């Protein structure tokens, strides 16, 4: 049976980003191994767009979104994958691979939100569009996002033999 892991070590943090977050906040505020006091809040309205790039292809099993129970936590999450360039225009016009309505208990307790792995079996980038929040206010706040899955097998170049070497 496949053992799923936190994919934080396979996330390319330098090429991952959160759009519409407060300018002083970094993606590493929410993409981290352990929960701490850091977070990301939306800037101009309640929407946030998290673009996660991986260092290699992965299978995504589930995600954990952690937030406060004060109404600022995200409610509608649309998930897209493998988009070269992805902004709010694409998030609002393209059909998501998956859509979730988050509930207070799931985000405050850090419950697994399971994906249909068939749809997420060869992922190079993951795009999470948080359209609104639980309280209906202008600010959405996220404390942590954990992506759970498995890295796809990579080719070990040192084990490849040319046709001549095999003879």
Image (tube, rainbow, N blue to C red):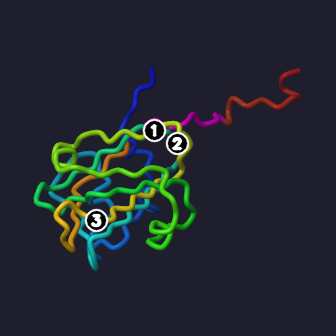
Give the Cα separation between the discs numbered 2 and 3.
24 Å
Up/down of 152 relative to 64, above or below: above
What residue does disc 3 label? Answer: 132
How far, Cα to Cα, is label 1 from label 2?
6 Å
Q: Does the magenta portion include 133?
A: no
| Residue bearing the label numbered 1 | 116
Q: Is residue 106 above or below residue 167?
A: below
Task: Give the residue displayed 17% in from the left and 50% down from the top.
Answer: 104
In this view, the residue in front, 32 or 18, is 18
Residue at 24% x, 40% y: name it. 111
- Location of the N terminus by quadrant is top left
**Contact (CB < 8 A) between labels 1 and 2?**
yes
In this view, the residue in front, 64 or 28, is: 64
Label count reads 3
As helix, strand or loop, the secondary structure at mark 3 comes to loop
> What segment carries the magenta color?
148-156
Which part of the image, by quadrant, shows the C terminus?
A: top right
Direction from residue 126 to residue 107 in the image, left or right: left
* 39 sits to left or right of 61: left
Question: Mark on residue 119?
Answer: 2
């Amino acid at each position: 049976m496949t053992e799923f892991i936190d994919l934080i070590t396979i996330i390319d943090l330098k090429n991952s980003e959160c759009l519409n977050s407060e300018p002083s906040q970094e993606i590493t505020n929410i993409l981290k191994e352990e929960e701490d006091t850091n977070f990301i809040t939306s800037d101009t309205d309640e929407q946030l767009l998290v673009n996660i790039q991986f260092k290699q292809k992965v299978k995504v099993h589930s995600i954990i979104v952690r937030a406060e129970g004060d109404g600022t936590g995200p409610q509608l999450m649309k998930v897209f994958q493998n988009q070269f360039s992805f902004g709010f225009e694409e998030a609002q016009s393209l059909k998501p691979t998956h859509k979730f309505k988050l509930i207070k208990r799931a985000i405050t307790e850090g419950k697994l939100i399971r994906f249909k792995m068939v749809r997420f079996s060869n992922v190079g980038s993951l795009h999470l569009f948080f359209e609104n929040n639980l309280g209906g206010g202008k600010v959405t706040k996220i404390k942590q996002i954990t992506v759970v899955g498995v890295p796809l097998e990579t080719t070990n170049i040192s084990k490849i033999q040319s046709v001549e070497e095999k003879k």
